[in-house]
Amino acid sequence: MKFTWTEEQQAFADSLESLLAASDTVSVARAWAEDDTAAGLRLWGRLAEQGVNALMVAEDAGGMGATGVELAIAFEALGRHAVPGPWVESAAYLPVALGADAVASELAEGAVGTVAVAPHVPHALDADIAAHVYVIDGGAARRGTVGERLHSVDNTRRLFRVAGDAPATLDGDLAAAFDTAALATSAQLLGAGERLLDEAVAYVKQRRQFGREIGSYQAIKHKLADVRIALDFARPLVNGAALSLGSDEATRDVAAAKVFTAEAAYLASRVALQVHGAIGYTRELDLSIWIMKVRALLTAWGTPAHHRGQVLEALVGAGA
Amino acid sequence: MDLELSPSELEFQAEARAWLAANVPTEPLPSMDTAEGWVLHQEWEKKLTEARYSVVSWPKEYHGREASLIEWVIFEEEYYRAGAPGRVSQNGIFLLAPIIFEHGTKEQQDRFLPTMASGERVWAQCWSEPEAGSDLASLRSTATRDDARGGWVLNGQKTWSSRATFAHWGFGLFRSDPEAARHAGLTYFLFPLDADGITVRPIAQLDGEAGFAEVFFEDVFVPDADVLGAPGDGWRVAMSTAGNERGLSLRSPGRFCAAADRLVDLWRTNGADHPEQREAVVDAWIRAQAYRLYTWGTVTRLAGGGDMGAAGSVNKVFWSELDVALHETGLDLLGAEAELESRWTDGYIFSLSGPIYAGTNEIQRNIVAERILGLPREAKGAGK
């Protein structure tokens, strides 16, 4: 029993953090939102060199066959730095859904893939730049054709309508793939929530009103304390779900993590906005990137209602 | 990272589960805050002690079995899952004992720990005063030096002393140096509640039972042998108790996981009539699960030599609010029958004390904000 990162896992987290902290990810995300994907794709390539894209690809398909724990570490970092692109699709869902398929090997090497999964993921991220586009409906997979560009409240999420075309055969387990994607989204939300709290704490320490830092007022302190508490309890749910991937409890545990982490990150976004006041309500302030990302991820890869249903079904049995 | 129990931990778990299944009373005991319930709870403690389950993590010489922190959490999970009685000796074994282990002399350990472990001598916490609640350091009860008799003379009043109505001994802080600043000049005393000069006046709690009491001290002599830690060092000594109360020891995850499981059971029978409670039921279960996993993280950190620190405050706010929400949801599932006294109303009323005792949740949020997030401290009032 050691419910904390191993030294190797800590080292992996540290290396991703130092890469992303030095990559001006805010500019990358802002350009990506304007359909200028060059810098983002360069960052995509560097993260692929670090192994992020290969984590969930099976070893016999040229991947790393890593655990959910490494996946959660990577996606927390992606969330913290608001790295744009179809990461959940390429590095979480498709590697598991594809199984031993040759496309999985390409993804491990850094090829861009994306997917829409009816009904929970109706549109596909960045389908215009993806080498592999899939549409999953009722357990059947098809190659996707790219349609209209849609606009998310998180403008770094470039969504597209996609339509199913030629049938595709996926070797992997689609339910396990969905669990993996929802876990990755939870970890992204955790990273985004931590970033929002960091930004809010830094701001209230320097912003002064009525002659003192606003962070010295209890009204502000208690809001931020509630965010700290919520995130502190979200993390073990994410880690527990990461360990649970592949087990009989995976769907239940991932669903629990998604519900709670989304709520914690959403609280972080609301509080961070509130303590910033009017400046927080501007697109110009970088905080806006995470505020809108959390709102979008809240319903991505399964709404809270869907995941609550998954938990309840697991607890009381089918038909409840 | 893993959540695997070792073979010996699994064996310990199986043994504890089997013993509890065979020994836990089939009917819940009457409230420990009644004369009848008190005796039955003490008898239960004796039974636990004979099986070496009353204080599993303590040394063998004091009725323990030197269990690891992991085994302690396992035991607590099994204990609550089995629906075993509340611990009448809780204030002693979880709040005072860690202080006696850390600050007590060997003589004090030998004298106090065995009967505390067995539930033979039950301890009450005497901290708050009428004018010193959240601001505990403003307490006014005094300890005056008596060199002739080799001890101290206590005067003043304590209140909200849990279990003091029936308990045998108490522990509390008194101001031994009136000249020293607030936190300095306090001394930690242990005293029999039937000592000359002590008057205990029971106070009925929200549930109508005398779960706490006022304790009046009128020239109560306490020998030096019953001072815990050094005279004047009481605040530091007491604050190590506060960490225990807030943190891991008082609210083991087993409590909430067992209650969440009961809530899911109630949903199975009553959910069809109350579909609007679906979200609240799921959220209570998720939070209990979060608390369980969080505790394993804490155990890992402590086993690795880390300390609880201000994280105890994060913990306390979470479990106390979870406990209220969980029981509110249970009552909501009972519909119009909810007001009738039941296990759910008992649990609900008990849960209402959680956000208040062990430092109110407002104080805890200040601690989280100031010590964990590093926000500036608020200027304190001028009062002493």
Image (tube, coloured by chain):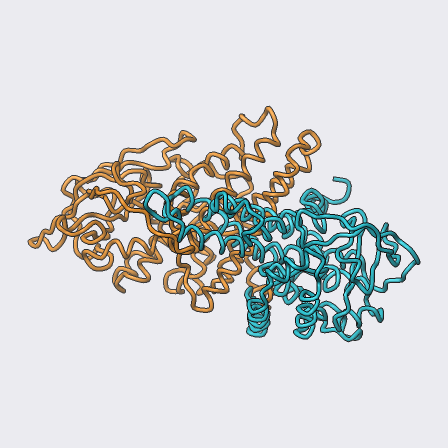
Q: Is residue A45 above or below residue B243?
A: below
Q: Looking at the colours in the rendered structure, which chain would you say is drawn in orange?
A: B
Q: Looking at the colours in the rendered structure, which chain would you say is drawn in cyan?
A: A
Q: Nearer the viewer, residue A136 or B336?
A: A136
Residue under the image location 80 percent in, 73 percent down: A61
Quadrant of the frame with the N terminus of chain A: bottom right
Indicate the position of residue B39 as horizontal and vertical percent values.
40, 41
In the shown orientation, is residue B256 left or right of residue A174?
A: left
Q: Is residue A180 visible in the rendered structure shown here?
A: no
Residue under the image location 55 percent in, 39 percent down: B326
Indicate the position of residue B58 as horizontal and vertical percent values.
40, 62
Instruction: Specify the farthest residue to the left.
Output: B148
Instruction: Specify the farthest residue to the right.
Output: A166
Indicate the position of residue B294 as horizontal and vertical percent values.
53, 56
Quadrant of res B124 = top left
Q: Is residue B8 above or below residue B129?
A: below
Residue under the image location 69 percent in, 42 percent down: A305
Q: Nearer the viewer, residue B24 or A92?
A: A92
